[in-house]
Image (tube, grey):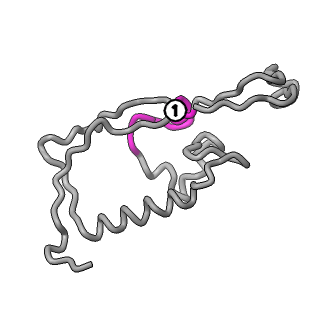
Amino acid sequence: MEGRIAKNDYTLGGRHTGITLRAGETIEFGIYAMHMNADYYPNPEQFNVDRFLPENRNQLTPYAFLPFGLGPRQCIAKRFAQMLVKLTLATLVLKYRFNTCEQTDIPTKVHISSFSNAPKCINLKIQSYIENYIY
């Protein structure tokens, strides 16, 4: 987690919140805590990609999902990373069939850290979708 240093005194939300950031203080956002907060995401431990579909966007709290940060200091490789993941998944799905097996953990066990949540282990049965695929 990377903090930011306040350059000037600043009162959040005007005088209504009672929270004032003082110049020189370090400000950090607990991204993991925010992403796993049931106030923002019902059943946060459950993987539900449908939360982010266009028809469900009205149920999301603005700025509660920050995988790459926001604003002028967001990750400069955000678009590249998203494009690379989509291309990789499309290629894998085109060439292979993925299935669970006896050793597959359901639900997946994750290693929780302040930076990311990586699976401890993923055991899948992978079969070639097209046996004689030429590339």
Q: Position of residue 68 (x, y in %)?
A: 58, 47
Task: Give the image location of residue 58, x and y in percent.
Answer: 61, 50
Q: Position of residue 77 (x, y in %)?
A: 58, 55
Q: Is residue 36 magenta?
A: yes
Question: What type is the residue that disc 1 sits on?
Answer: Tyr
Image x and y of residue 108, in percent: 29, 38
Where is 79 relative to 36, above or below? below
Q: Secondary structure at mark 1?
A: helix
Between 134 and 99, the one lying in front of the other is 134
Residue 43 in view of the camera: no
Query: Which residue lies at the image location 58% right of the left edge and 29% below the top edge?
Result: 30
What's the magenta region?
31-47
Disc 1 crowd rating (10 Å Cα; few below 14, some 14-19, many 20+) is some
Res. 134 image quadrant: bottom left
Residue depicted at x 42% and y 36%: 117
Q: Quadrant of the N terminus?
A: top right
Q: Toward which corner of the image does residue 55 lie, by quadrant?
A: bottom right
Q: Which residue is mark 1?
A: 32
- Outermost residue to the left: 102
- Camera-nearest residue between 110 and 15: 110
**Residue under the image location 52 percent in, 36 percent down:** 35
Foreground residue among 54 and 133:
133
Q: Is residue 30 left or right of residue 100?
A: right
Quadrant in which the C terminus appears: bottom left
Which residue shows up at 61% across the image and 40% down it? 64
Q: Is residue 80 magenta?
A: no
